[in-house]
């Protein structure tokens, strides 16, 4: 039963502000992902929570108690790192038992806890092995067991699966989530991989340049990005630079009516799945030319060149008969208008029926 609060947490390295004032509340048993591109301050934030890095200012509270002056080894946290950090000269059993021995637990107690931890990560018979006899995925499971055996209040994970191949990464992330739910531990997981964050997290904190741009549940991070950075970073997005004059924004052949009147530069964001492919002569649509067709197995991604708008990413069902250089119509049904210093505005149009499968355009 543990909560974490970060209050105005900040870290400065010389001239570089790695983390600006971050405020964050993580609930008991919550799985929070910190997501952002390389260098945005994710690891620095996590290392401050663990006590490996001293904050320049601000506070860190676990269950309402400040831990900011507490040494790392006294904090109720445990960390799993990206690189395998098992001690190479120690058996798996001793790697996991190490922290318990330091705490002076009785042998039988250590034995029971180590075996439970091995069981929990699905490697019950691995105690006698040396780390170099384990695959990368197995090493990370043992690293997780070693962290969990200490029964920390907060589990911290810094890109723990980034060195593993894609399939294994997906398997281990599902397993981690199962284990985290089972032991009901509060977890903070750092990643630059949006798919990992979207599939794992109860909530995601999207970071850019040391700041939290948006903190929300995955579906809202995807559907209602709070900033242009989040809109661009999460998922596939079409971004169209445009001018707003009063309420109207002209996007090539389509005119968008905004509920707010301003004059100035805006960026209009449209998800590919919000663009229907329609007939070329549809008056309520953009006319465009298929520049490229990228086959993605169960569907196809099209790059479509639309005059005065640019090249748009659109999804097409496989059954739709399309060729490169073909002229088609595109009917967008949902836009988000971003303007500097203003909250984003969502505008919907009536969605039209897309072309029937197998019907030639
Ligand atoms: N020990 C350090 N000394 C100086 N600068 C650092 C140090 N650690 C991190 N930084 C800088 O702080 C910024 C954030 O780094 P980091 O937290 O590692 O980002 P991330 O984990 O998101 O990739 C980067 O600009 C990085 O160069
Ligand atoms: Mg990092």
Image (spheres, grey):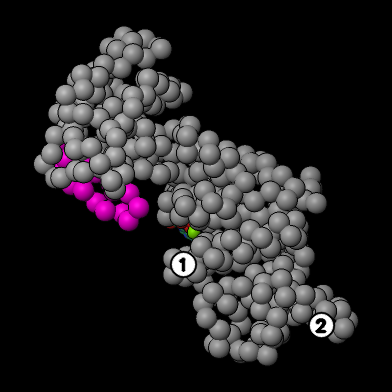
Q: Residues within 10 Å of mark 1 (few under 14, many from 20)?
A: few
Where in the figure is residue 207, as x and y percent of width and height? 49, 44
Q: Is residue 325 among what the camera can see?
A: yes
- The answer to whether the residue bearing label 2 lies less than 8 angstroms from the nearest atom of ligand 2 is no
Tell me the crowding category of disc 2: few under 14, some 14 to 19, or many 20 or more residues within 10 angstroms, Cα based.
Answer: some
Secondary structure category for the residue under label 1: helix
C-beta proximity under 8 Å, tags 1 and 2: no
Q: Position of residue 181 (x, y in %)?
A: 71, 56
Q: Quadrant of residue 205?
A: top right
Instruction: Name the residue: 31% across, 9% down.
Output: 246
Q: Which mark is residue 349?
A: none
Left or right of 286? Residue 139 is right
Report if residue 171 lies within the magenta region. Answer: no
Q: Which residue is mark 2?
A: 111
| Depth order, front residue of 354/142 | 354
Q: Secondary structure at mark 2?
A: helix
Residue 317: percent from the left, percent from the top? 31, 44
Residue lying farthest to the left in this orientation: 325
Q: Position of residue 297 (x, y in %)?
A: 32, 56
Residue sitting at 87 percent across and 83 percent down? 108
Q: Nearer the viewer, residue 136 or 147?
A: 136
Examine the residues drawn in magenta and state their main secondary structure.
strand
Quick check: is 294 in the magenta stretch?
yes
Residue 337 in sight: no
Q: At 16% from the left edge and 24% from the top edge, which residue is drawn?
A: 281
Q: Which residue is mark 1?
A: 167
Quarter the C terminus occupies: top left
Range of the magenta residues? Answer: 289-303
Say left or right for 229 vs 157.
left
């Amino acid at each position: 039963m543990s909560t974490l609060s970060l209050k105005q947490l900040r870290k400065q390295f010389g001239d570089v502000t790695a983390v600006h004032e971050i405020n964050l509340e993580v609930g008991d048993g919550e799985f929070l992902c910190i997501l952002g591109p390389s260098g945005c301050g994710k690891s620095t934030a996590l290392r401050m929570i663990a006590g490996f890095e001293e904050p320049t200012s601000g506070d860190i509270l676990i269950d309402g108690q400040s831990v900011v002056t507490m040494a790392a080894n006294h904090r109720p946290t445990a960390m799993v790192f990206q690189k395998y950090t098992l001690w190479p000269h120690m058996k798996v059993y001793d790697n996991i038992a190490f922290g318990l021995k330091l705490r002076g637990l009785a042998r039988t107690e250590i034995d029971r806890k180590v075996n439970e931890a091995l069981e929990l990560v699905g490697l019950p018979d691995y105690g006698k092995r040396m780390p170099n006899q384990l695959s990368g995925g197995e090493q990370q499971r043992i690293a997780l067991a070693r962290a969990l055996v200490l029964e920390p209040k907060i589990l911290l994970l810094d890109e723990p699966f980034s060195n593993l191949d894609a399939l294994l990464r997906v398997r281990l992330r599902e397993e981690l989530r199962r284990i985290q739910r089972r032991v009901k531990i509060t977890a903070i997981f750092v990643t630059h991989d949006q798919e990992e964050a979207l599939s794992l997290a109860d909530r995601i904190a999207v970071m850019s340049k040391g700041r939290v741009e948006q903190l929300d549940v995955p579906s809202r991070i995807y559907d209602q990005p709070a900033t242009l950075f989040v809109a661009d970073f999460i998922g596939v997005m079409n971004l169209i630079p445009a001018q707003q004059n009063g309420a109207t924004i002209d996007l090539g052949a389509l005119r968008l009516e905004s509920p707010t009147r301003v004059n100035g530069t805006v960026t209009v964001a449209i998800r590919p799945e919000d663009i229907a492919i329609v007939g070329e002569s549809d008056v309520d649509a953009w006319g465009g030319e298929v520049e490229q067709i990228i086959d993605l197995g169960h569907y196809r991604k099209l790059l479509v060149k639309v005059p005065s708008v640019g090249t748009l990413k659109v999804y097409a069902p496989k059954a739709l008969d399309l060729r490169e250089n073909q002229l088609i119509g595109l009917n967008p049904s949902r836009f988000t208008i971003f303007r500097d210093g203003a909250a984003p505005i969502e505008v919907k149009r009536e969605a039209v029926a897309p072309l029937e499968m197998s019907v030639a355009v």
